[in-house]
Amino acid sequence: MAILKLIKANIKSKKESFIGIAILVAIITCMLATIISVTVCLDSQYDNAISMTNTGDIVYIYNSDEVDNDMIKEITSMNEVEKVIQIPCISSRRVSTKLREYRSMVFFFAYEPDRQMYQFFDDKGSNLVPRQGEIYLPKAMEKKLGCKIGDTISVDTGYGEESVTITRFFEEPFIGAEMIGYKNVLINQEDLNRLRENTEEICVNMETIHVFIKDEIKNQANYKESKTLDKINKQTGVQNGCVTSMTKSEAKSFTLMMDNILSAIISCFAFLLLIVVLIVISHNVSSSIEMEYLSFGILKSQGFTNGLIRLSLVLQYLVAGIVGTLLGLLGSVFATNLLGKEFVSLTGLIWKGKLELGLSLLAVIALFLFIALFTFIKTKKIAKISPVQAFSLGHEPVYFKGKMDFYVDKMKHLPLSMKLVIKALVSNTKEYISTLFIIILLTTFTIMATSMNQLTKEENLYSMVGTIESHITVRITSDELRPLLANIRTTIEEETSITKEYSTNNAYFMVDGTQFLGRVIDHTDGVLQPALEGKNPEYNNEIAITEVMKDELGKDIGDTVIIDNSGVQEEFLIVGICKNMNDLGRNFTILLEGVHKMNPEFNIMDVSFCVTDDSKVESIVTTLETNLREYENEIRVSNNQKENDSTNETIRMVIMGVTMVIYLISLFFIAIVIGMICRKAFLREKVDLGIYKSVGFTTGSLRFQFSFRFVTVVLIGTVLGTILNVLTNDVLMNNMLYNIGITHFNTKYTVQNILIPCLWICSCTFVYSWLLSRKIKRVSCKMLIQE
């Protein structure tokens, strides 16, 4: 009972510190519980959705006329394979609405609930199949095309351009996410049969081959998916002739990519805030032992042991942690649903998440144990207190007695008020070190969050992810119409000059037995960014690979690889390391002439242009569409500015949202930490403030000195935090973004990037310390008499 009374008394006498620690723990708990819940729920929802669709462990997509039935039988007969399912579809490279065009390949399947069942973003159930002339779209295409239920979309088919009506949006876990270019859509079986009877180059009959690996193979401790797939390919050659392929694990990585990035960032920030909380606890414990020296001596004289006193302090902070945890868990209920719904357009998954209480509590318990151990270690100084020392030394002044103490009259050129500020800072350096560390950490991470906004700006995005800038793209599906390119160039140059012209396309190739995405381009001179190492390919036997591909293959500049396309193999020399985040960085760049060595019929239909004055792009596209109206089925003109804006809009909003959350949390942390430290400083210096008032200092002057002291510490902290960020930011960002293919994040420091976080922290500190220093008004000279 004695310890309970002691804890109750401590909490009552230090309620500000108790509330501050509780709020800090609440913020950390809310962040951890939210990110754990969102990550677990999305992972679970993906697994449930993919199991309903009866998707194979790996899916190969073939042109129908290239499917070898003997190969299918050979795959089926392998010991590792449970079954193979073959599903027909067609592909089209042009699907558009009145507003936008979807330029990646779209696969049209007949919806058969008995074979592959999907869940929908409505309450009509999963068994309702589309009628003729209707289409179901994956949720991610809603923003891509800027469409809604009831809108019509245009599709290029063998019968020409046809219109179908959007009647439902469905959950497509395999290739339905924002970050995956290819998309599956669902139509009526009779529509699919009719379309497959008449196809052209732009609309092709396809087959998807779903290969299911036996559960007993996948459940083996030493099971590696890549080895099993390599074995299947070497034995059957299935990978060599396919248009593309993807495993369920790869699809999951693409679908949950943004969730994984944000999880890493928020977890890192939560860990940083935990360090801040530990620094605050350390400061509070040290200050309490020093300021309540006499009280602890009295407790010892009354029979309280060292262990009991230390335990009371530990339990005091644990009680604050429990209160904070309850508040944090309550807040995470709302935060989880809010964040989960934001991921719907990114993942294409239906959000059915809720707070994962069990896992969240495990994380919180680990947090408690860490805080308890840290607090117990910090209270070891209590063992050095004896009642005799406490009674004899408890009332002696402890201010201006540090090792760095000096006389203020040495600084004759400074006003007295500034001398006192410097005196307090130097003489109590130890008391301000904790504040300094906290500000350094918050500044470093706040600038890091600000640097992420670089990814929301198109010019920076091109630089970091390695994509090629393009303002206008012209797709010509007929070789007979290629001479019209001369007229197209003339039309563009009447408005503005052309800075780049190139043709590029992506295709999958086998490289040393493993599938990688190849960026095929007609030339690289003046088109690609300079290679990170070496050079870009210039001849038909050269390629440039990314850092991710380099790590996976274990090869570098000067090594050779064997590339297979359409069953033809050629040797290529690696001449450079390049940037390109496509396919999570698993890609390489190759010239069109190099591909023609393996497949002479490989063709690129798109011609892209970059112009000097991008403000004229819209008018140029309108003019080209008018001039080429008679060829509208064979020639399509796209405004890439609009398409890029719509593609990056969701990612931009998520990044900006995370940045704002980090700013707001930093605001709360600064307010709470500065508030707690200011209160401690005020209690320690109350007598000195009375002395200053007795010699003529006004309340306003003392409040300014008090606030200026903290602002000085914070200003030093922001400078050091900025230096620390410059030294570490690129390394940290590269480690966090490596899994999505960004391996060379180069922070572009501007006055805005640095000043906004620093001014934010400094101004918040001054405001909080000024408001808290209003208690100085109540300090009077009577305190000297009491002393």
Image (cartoon, rainbow, N blue to C red):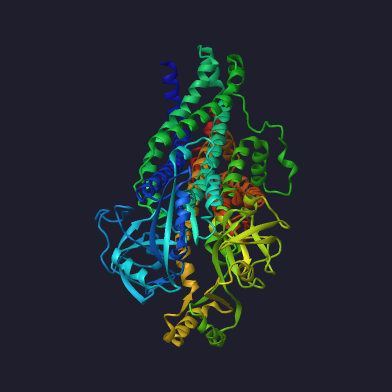
Camera-side residue of 410 and 174: 174
Camera-side residue of 240 and 364: 240
Q: Position of residue 51 (x, y in %)?
A: 37, 47
Residue placed farthest to the right in the image? 410
The image shows residue 303, relative to residue 293, as above or below, that is above
Which image quarter is the C terminus in? Answer: top right
Q: Position of residue 600 (x, y in %)?
A: 59, 71
Q: Position of residue 415 (x, y in %)?
A: 67, 48
Q: Position of residue 137 (x, y in %)?
A: 35, 62
Is there any visible trace of residue 773 in the rendered image? no
| Residue 189 position by quadrant | bottom left
The image shows residue 440, relative to residue 375, as above or below, that is below
Left or right relative to 452: residue 540? right
Question: Residue drawn 41% across and 39% down?
Answer: 328
Left or right relative to 597: residue 678? left
Is there any visible trace of residue 587 in the rendered image? yes
The image shows residue 188, relative to residue 726, as above or below, that is below
| Residue 320 position by quadrant | top left
Left or right relative to 708: residue 626? left
Camera-side residue of 764 and 79: 79
Which image quarter is the N terminus in? Answer: top left
